[in-house]
């Protein structure tokens, strides 16, 4: 077992701790399907590692890719280099795998597989030798125009030199500073994504939500229609749920939009 394999990754430690037409709808669906296929193919080509596009996804196991299927690699002396290109379908090697920790709403910390936090020294070299997170171990991912660059604490962007050394020496980001941050963390789709807050939950809860939202009584007491709610299930399937809910509220004279 190598020294790298013996390292256990622990928790983060901080220094000094703290309505459209059917035609359009079908067209959109077709676009979504194509976008999904592109994303899936990209993930497959990188061994299951998917491209991070949002700051909120930067957590846990990640890898920093420069070019195509080449990742920055931690060396046992604390320095970093650009690893050799991988074959299509292969993910990063163990030495190319990092752990990301959010520090605040804009910055992260990174830890190498050797259990050391990654920072920048006075000469702009990227090093992984710290046992805790200080100011020099802060990194700021910058998303813009579907591109990503990572800003170091010295005000320069992460890049790879002509000698394949990893450094932060340029104050502006260009093609040599653009990276792809990849994750192997399993993504969980939110079943309520795109669903209004009022329409989340059972039909009984949905009706209560809308009564609460549109009620006109100053005493704030809910007037709920106690008639059979089976019509709500049918209305939901037929796409007339809102109209049916309004009709039920109007019978209770509980809606400020009711005549």
Image (spheres, rainbow, N blue to C red):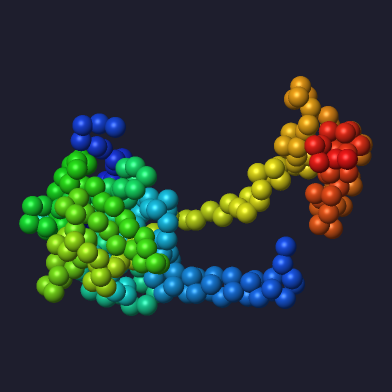
**For this rendering, which residue is in front, 182 or 45?**
182
Quarter that holds the N terminus:
bottom left
Residue sitting farthest toward the bottom: 87
Q: Residue at x 42, y 56 (%)?
A: 54
**For this rendering, which residue is in front, 89 or 79?**
79
Q: Residue at x 20, y 35 (%)?
A: 15
Q: Position of residue 143 (x, y in %)?
A: 36, 60
Res. 89 visible in picture: yes
Res. 97 visible in picture: no
Image height of 248 relative to 16, above or below: below
Report the number of numbered marks: 0
Image height of 37 relative to 219, above or below: below
Q: Residue at x 39, y 71 (%)?
A: 46
Task: Say whether residue 99 is left or right of residue 250.
Answer: left
Task: Say whether residue 162 is left or right of residue 11.
Answer: left
Q: Residue at x 63, y 50 (%)?
A: 192
Q: Position of residue 67 (x, y in %)?
A: 29, 74
Quarter that holds the C terminus:
top right
Residue sitting farthest toward the front: 259
**For this rendering, which residue is in front, 102 or 48?**
102
Q: Position of residue 213 (x, y in %)?
A: 72, 37
Residue sitting farthest toward the top: 219
Image height of 100 relative to 224, above or below: below
């Amino acid at each position: 077992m190598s020294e790298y394999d013996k390292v256990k990754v622990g928790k983060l430690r901080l220094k000094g701790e703290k309505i459209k037409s059917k035609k359009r709808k079908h067209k959109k669906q077709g676009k979504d399907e194509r976008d999904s296929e592109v994303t899936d193919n990209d993930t497959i080509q990188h061994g299951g590692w998917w491209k991070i596009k949002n700051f909120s996804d930067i957590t846990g196991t990640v890898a920093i890719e420069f070019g195509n299927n080449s990742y920055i690699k931690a060396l046992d002396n604390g320095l970093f280099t650009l690893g050799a290109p991988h074959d299509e379908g292969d993910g990063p090697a163990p030495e190319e795998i990092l752990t990301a920790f959010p520090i605040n709403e804009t910055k992260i910390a990174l830890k190498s597989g050797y259990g050391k936090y990654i920072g920048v020294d006075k000469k702009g070299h990227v090093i992984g030798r710290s046992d805790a997170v200080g100011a020099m171990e802060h990194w700021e991912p910058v998303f813009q125009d579907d591109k990503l660059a990572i800003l170091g604490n010295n005000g320069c962007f992460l890049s790879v030199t002509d000698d394949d050394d990893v450094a932060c020496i340029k104050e502006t980001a260009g093609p040599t500073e653009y990276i792809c941050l990849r994750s192997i963390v399993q993504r969980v789709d939110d079943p309520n994504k795109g669903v209004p807050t009022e329409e989340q939950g059972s039909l009984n809860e949905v009706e209560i939500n809308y009564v609460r939202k549109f009620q006109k009584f100053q005493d704030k007491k809910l007037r709920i229609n106690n008639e059979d709610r089976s019509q709500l299930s049918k209305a939901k399937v037929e796409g007339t749920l809102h109209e049916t809910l309004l009709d039920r509220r109007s019978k209770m004279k509980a809606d400020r939009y009711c005549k």
